[in-house]
Image (spheres, rainbow, N blue to C red):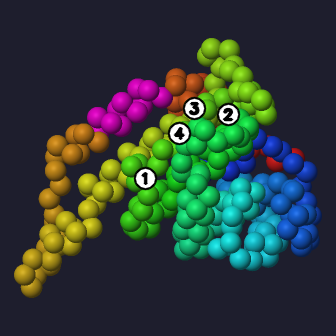
């Protein structure tokens, strides 16, 4: 779960680290100009002091008051704030509230056209990458939380033509161009893209291994319940093959290893999702 949460943070906190506002801020302008990272302090509650958890709750309450009508979320900044609220709810195990807010975030992103690739629209590289990161973060969370709770996954690949974020970190993205790092330089967004592809495989697992109609038809036969149902072995082998291919394509420095990058070890085991200033 820690690695999943890390992937979502990468897209949600795109590009800028800002000065934190006071949790007592009550105006939309004041709160939106600050980072929402304090909402994420309890991601690993056993690692954080109680004071940090209490602080994060204050920020969540302030954010909810500013975004009092979340159904009217129509700009990127508001949607980013909503995503941070979702991450807070997920990390504190409020899955019901998390799922409800996710539905709003996903549909708001569709209404804003974040699921579409717009090559002929004039926008800066920062704006384009922000749209990509934000949309795919929301989609990853929707797939993961829906699978956990046993709800249908509503958005499918054929509905989306927005590419994954460019696999470079923020320091290589300017308002004028995307600068590519030296070959072999690891990027957090390699992990982000890999996690997006893993969520696509999870969608197939939910669809073919746990089909709603197939399970219902097999479980109830006649008047007596039957606790078994049939699964296509060929489909299981296909998914296993896709998982194997996914792992083989995973950059070596992002594979789980105690000898790997310190960012990987920190992400998986104990550290906060990103530096909090």
Label whose residue precedes the other's in the sequence (2 or 4): 4
Indicate which label's residue lies in the foreground, 3 or 4.
4
* Number of numbered markers: 4
Q: Is residue 217 left or right of residue 169?
A: left
User: Which circle marks residue 163 in the picture?
Assistant: 4
Per the rendered image, the range of residues in magenta is 240-250
Is residue 30 found inside the magenta-colored segment of the image? no
| Residue annotated with mark 3 | 190
Instruction: For mark 2, give the secondary structure.
Output: helix
Q: Quadrant of residue 221?
A: bottom left
Kindly identify the residue that appears in the image at 54 percent across and 48 percent down: 116
User: Callout 1: 10 Å neighbours few (<14), some, many (20+)?
Assistant: few
Upstream in the sequence, badge 2 or badge 3? 3
Crowd rating for badge 2 (residues with CA inside 10 Å; few <14, some 14–19, many 20+): some
| Of pointers 3 and 1, the one earlier in the residue sequence | 1
* Residue visible at 22% across and 40% down in the picture: 237
């Amino acid at each position: 779960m820690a690695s999943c949460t890390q992937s979502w943070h990468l897209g949600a906190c795109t590009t800028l680290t800002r000065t934190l506002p006071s949790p007592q801020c009550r105006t939309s302008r004041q709160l939106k100009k600050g980072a929402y990272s304090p909402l994420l302090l309890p991601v690993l509650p056993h690692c954080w002091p109680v004071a940090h958890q209490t602080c994060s709750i204050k920020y969540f309450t302030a954010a909810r008051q500013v975004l009092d009508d979340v159904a009217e979320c129509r700009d990127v900044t508001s949607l980013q704030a909503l995503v941070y609220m979702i991450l807070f709810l997920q990390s504190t195990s409020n899955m019901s509230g998390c799922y409800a807010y996710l539905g709003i975030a996903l549909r708001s992103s569709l209404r804003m056209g974040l699921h579409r690739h717009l090559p002929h629209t004039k926008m800066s590289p920062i704006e384009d990458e922000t749209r990509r990161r934000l949309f795919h973060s929301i989609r990853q969370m929707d797939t993961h939380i829906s699978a956990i709770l046993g709800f249908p996954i509503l958005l499918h690949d054929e509905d989306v033509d927005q590419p994954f974020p460019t696999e470079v970190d923020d320091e290589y993205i300017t308002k004028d161009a995307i600068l590519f790092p030296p070959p072999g330089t690891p990027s957090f967004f390699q992990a982000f893209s890999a996690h997006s592809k893993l969520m696509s495989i999870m969608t197939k697992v939910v669809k073919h291994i746990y089909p709603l109609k197939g399970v219902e038809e097999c479980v109830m036969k006649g008047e007596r319940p039957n606790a078994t149902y049939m699964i296509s072995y060929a489909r299981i082998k296909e998914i296993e093959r896709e998982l194997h291919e996914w792992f083989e394509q995973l950059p070596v420095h992002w594979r789980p290893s105690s000898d790997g990058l310190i960012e990987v070890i920190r992400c998986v085991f104990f550290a906060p999702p990103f530096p909090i200033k």
